[in-house]
Amino acid sequence: MSLNFAIALEKSLNIPAELWLNLQTQYDLDMAGIAKRDSQVATFPVTIPVEDKKLLKELARKFGWACLL
């Protein structure tokens, strides 16, 4: 939200421009936090005992697992 738009809202709705700008700032901070959280990928090794290597490869492909055979 721009300063000009916040001022226009203040004039038309009688709600302080500072409130609109604070809401926008909080939204931007929340979105940045979500983006940071989503970019952090947790990885951990798992051993899955399977006899059928084709099945394991198919599961890895379907679920996006990194598979070392």
Image (cartoon, grey):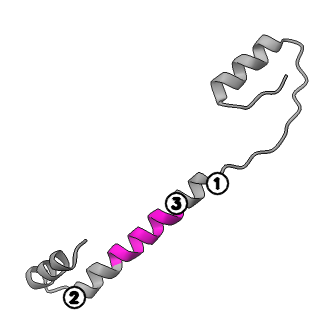
Magenta-drawn stretch, dominant element (helix, strand or loop)? helix
Which residue carries the number 1 mark? 40
Callout 3 secondary element: helix
Q: Which mark is residue 16?
A: 2
Percent across and percent down for residue 40 are 64, 54
Whether residue 3 appears in magenta in the rendering, the answer is no
Check the image and report above or below for 60 versus 55.
below
Percent across and percent down for residue 4 are 15, 78
Classify the position of the C terminus by image quarter: top right
Is the residue under label 2 in contact with that under label 3 (CB below 8 Å)?
no
The type of residue carrying mark 3 is Ile
The type of residue carrying mark 1 is Gln
Q: Earlier in the sequence, mark 2 or mark 1?
A: 2
Is the residue under label 1 in contact with that under label 2 (CB below 8 Å)?
no
Check the image and report above or below for 38 versus 56.
below
The boundaries of the magenta stretch are 23-34
Check the image and report above or below for 15 versus 46.
below
Disc 2 packing (10 Å; few <14; some 14–19; many ≥20) = some
Whether residue 25 appears in magenta in the rendering, the answer is yes
Task: Please give the name of the residue rendered at 59% of the width and 53% of the height, measured from the top-left corner.
Answer: 39
Callout 1 secondary element: loop
